[in-house]
Image (tube, grey):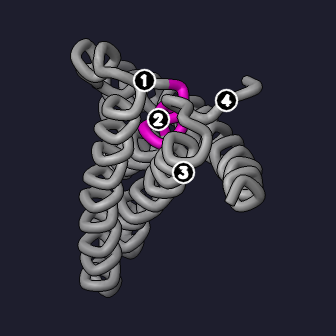
């Protein structure tokens, strides 16, 4: 089982590094598009018709990818005051059960997000005329990445007793 945990950890590291670069690229795109839109609107008299839509879609993507990137670093909201004070085995059980509940919720988000992505595949956005599957795809992709990270964390709690798997970052 530790071999599976190590493989999952390496896979997650690769996926999260790619997601991190996706967040950086998305932030760079937004930081270029918004000033361009403002400049066009106030100095040229009209802004690009597609900039608002592109900004919103990019924000959705970087939010979902950023949530996945932040998860192993502990950036999510957590109330661990009582769990941290539980005796070893009981605290470990509660942490593991919390990861199972999270895996269930992320599974629901993943399944329904994929369903919505497929459902909206033929719909096009009003300004950019792209398939709405592109912005909707951020939901199952982000949920899948968070699911993998949470699975790794659950396995780490179960097999090593650690609160979270070690990160060399």
Is residue 55 in view? no
Instruction: Please tell me whether the stretch drawn in magenta is mainly helix, strand or loop.
Output: helix
Q: Is mark 1 in CB contact (under 8 Å) with mark 3? A: no
Instruction: Determine the CA span between mark 3 and mark 2.
Output: 15 Å
Left or right of residue 81: residue 73: right
Whether 71 is drawn above or below 116: the answer is above
Residue 83 in percent (x, y) is at 28, 23
User: Residue 75 got which mark?
Assistant: 1
Secondary structure, mark 2, is helix
Q: In which quadrant of the rendered view does residue 115 lie?
A: bottom left
- Disc nearer the start of the sequence (4/1): 1
Q: Is mark 3 in CB contact (under 8 Å) with mark 4? A: no
Q: Is mark 3 in CB contact (under 8 Å) with mark 2? A: no
Residue 69 in percent (x, y) is at 54, 37
Identify the residue shown where x is 73% and y is 24%: 169
Q: Nearer the viewer, mark 3 or mark 4?
A: 3
Q: Is mark 1 in CB contact (under 8 Å) with mark 2? A: yes
Q: Pointer 2: residues within 10 angstroms few (<14), some, or many (20+)? A: some
Secondary structure, mark 3, is helix
Whether 145 is drawn above or below 35: the answer is below
Toward the viewer: 56 or 92? 92
Left or right of residue 54: residue 24: right
Residue occupied by mark 2: 71
- Disc nearer the start of the sequence (1/3): 1
User: Residue 155 got which mark?
Assistant: 3
Q: Nearer the viewer, mark 3 or mark 2?
A: 3
């Amino acid at each position: 089982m530790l071999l599976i945990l190590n493989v999952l950890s390496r896979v997650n590291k690769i996926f999260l590094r790619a997601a991190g670069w996706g967040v950086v690229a998305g932030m760079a795109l937004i930081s270029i598009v918004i000033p361009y839109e403002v400049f066009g609107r106030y100095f040229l008299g009209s802004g690009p018709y597609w900039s608002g839509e592109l900004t919103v879609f990019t924000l959705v993507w970087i939010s979902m990818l950023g949530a996945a990137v932040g998860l192993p670093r502990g950036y999510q909201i957590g109330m661990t005051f009582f769990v941290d004070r539980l005796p070893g085995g009981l605290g470990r059980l509660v942490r593991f059960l919390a990861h199972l509940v999270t895996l269930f919720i992320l599974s629901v988000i993943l399944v329904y997000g994929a369903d919505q992505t497929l459902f909206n595949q033929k719909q096009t956005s009003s300004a950019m005329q792209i398939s709405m599957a592109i912005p909707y795809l951020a939901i199952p992709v982000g949920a899948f990445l968070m699911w993998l990270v949470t699975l790794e964390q659950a396995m780490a709690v179960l097999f090593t007793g650690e609160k979270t798997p070690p990160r060399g970052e």
